[in-house]
Image (cartoon, rainbow, N blue to C red):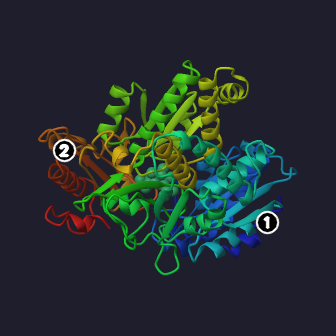
Amino acid sequence: MDLEAVARCSARHAKPAGLAMHYGTAGFRGRAPSLDHVMFRMGALAVLRARATASAIGVMVTASHNPEEDNGVKLIDPHGEMLHPLWEEYATQLANAEEQELQKVMTEICQKEAVDLHRDALVFIGRDTRPSSLKLSQAVMDGVCVLGGQYHDYGLVTTPQLHYMVCCHNTQGQYGKATLEGYYEKLSKAFVELIKKANSSSSGDRQRHLKIDCANGIGALKLREMERYFPQEVLIQLYNDGSREKLNHLCGADYVKVHQKPPRGLDMKPNERCCSFDGDADRIVYYYKDADDHFHLIDGDKIATLISIFLKELLVKVERTLTVAVVQTAYANGSSTRYLEETMKVPVHCVKTGVKHLHHKAQEFDVGVYFEANGHGTVLFSKAAETKIRQLAKEEKDDERREAAKMLENVIDLINQTVGDAIADMLVIEAILALKGLTVQQWDSIYTDLPNRLLKVQVADRQVICTTDAERRVTAPPALQAAIDALVSTRQAARAFVRPSGTEDTVRVYAEAHTQEAADALAHEVSAAVHRLAGGVGAPPQPAAPATLLT
Ligand code: G16
């Protein structure tokens, strides 16, 4: 490692003195101008990680659902999964090292991880459509080059596409071809195979009309590229394609989920099936409005439920010994958990927010369905389950069992097992709805969500809030949990929790209760308690003006 060269190059990507950042829920996030040094350093760290694992590593420049002015970076590990927690710590140390400490921190990481500095290193780089992303991805490239690594710049891609590329490369093509064409071909082939079986069902209209809000982000570009691979049955209409408006502004999956209303710019007719992607296309939520103009959100919990029902029905026919479980977070609607556990008899596990936590837990099962309520999720199949299913799909003599195994095989090929992927999830959902002959309303009616509200509160330092029990309870500040308990106890079917965001400088407050009014009131009162007990900034939340908290 040429430490002199590192110092010289780093000076061109100088860290603002005193600036400290953390590798949060999904990497580093912040205002784009403050991130140049972070990008350079993450390029360098990716080289060390590539050498330590003897595998290609991914670096995705994106701030996903955050405002357009923000940016961020997510590192992708060899199998396309999120960065290992220990390396998240190294990432934080490296990002926060002052210029004169940089060489020392890098040397320490190399020593601790016994990094072979002579080994080749390959880094895959991708970026979203933010105006700042191109320049920031060039800083990543500088970081790769200064340590003698090689990079492959995929340019504009969705985050899940980059995860897929990393996995394909490191599994020597077993997962697919590490190109965009390879991704489109793999998914569309599996989708066409899966949806073929819908032809014999009784759902009548074979055409699948879907309106997609692309959050003015990368999803629009990639869906346009992919459209020619779709079968004729699929008619998609893209809205918020980024040609006119700002990324994530009044649109996108996060906006729709948090505000529980349609995105701007999507012309929605009664009972039409619509969905929204987020800024880097790793989340999806569905929705429709009924004949009375009421908006109905179908979030990650209901997506997980639909997929679990479908998979469970197939597994019963194919192989009863394979275990299915669903992994959720504290944000999961209480009705979804109850439906999964009590009606479907599927075990449900609750983990901390962040797909890395859900992914890790889901790996414990033969079939692990994981979704955050915000629409971020996927399905994991264990190697043993996958082998068994593929074998039955090929060799099973019983027609019904073989056909069910083939469908499962198609789901395995269609879903992006590396990470939540809005495009792959959308195709899985569309296929299931077609195969089961379900309308969006029928899907929505599987269970009724408990009314809920998600708010944000500004505090001086959100790290003063510490949580336990998968973020369902607060341990600090000391009086806060007692205050939440007291507020919850005054409402029926109520629940509330607070946690510091790992992607924005804010504290998130979630509440649910038996009526929307009760959920709103509870969320506001809990917000006021956070403001009072955790160092709120500005005026305390005003119950009469909920919209002020929803920015
Ligand atoms: C990221 C993570 C998600 C998480 C979300 C919000 O999503 O990948 O797992 O739910 O941030 O996290 P927090 O509440 O900590 O801000 P994305 O789509 O922004 O990458």
From the image, which quarter does the N terminus lie in? bottom right
User: Measured from the top left, where is residue 489 in percent x and y?
Assistant: 14, 38
Residue 265 lies in quadrant: bottom left
Residue furthest right in the image: 118
Residue 348 appears anywhere in the view: yes
Residue 72 lies in quadrant: bottom right
Measuring 13% from the left and 41% from the top, which residue is drawn there? 491
Tell me: 141 left or right of 244: right
Question: Between 76 and 476, which is closer to the camera in this rendering?
Answer: 76
Measuring 21% from the left and 68% from the top, which residue is drawn there? 539
Instruction: State whether residue 2 is above or below residue 453.
Output: below
User: Measured from the top left, where is residue 21 in percent x and y?
Assistant: 52, 60
What's the amino acid at mark 1?
Answer: Val
Q: Which residue is mark 2?
A: 483
Q: CA distance from mark 2 to mark 1?
A: 52 Å
Tell me: 48 left or right of 541: right
Residue furthest left in the image: 490
Q: Which residue is mark 1?
A: 146
From the image, which quarter does the C terminus lie in? bottom left
| Mark 2, secondary structure of its residue | helix
User: Measured from the top left, where is residue 236 in percent x and y?
Assistant: 52, 63
Residue furthest top in the image: 321
What's the amino acid at mark 2?
Answer: Ala
| Mark 1, secondary structure of its residue | helix
Tell me: 168 left or right of 344: right
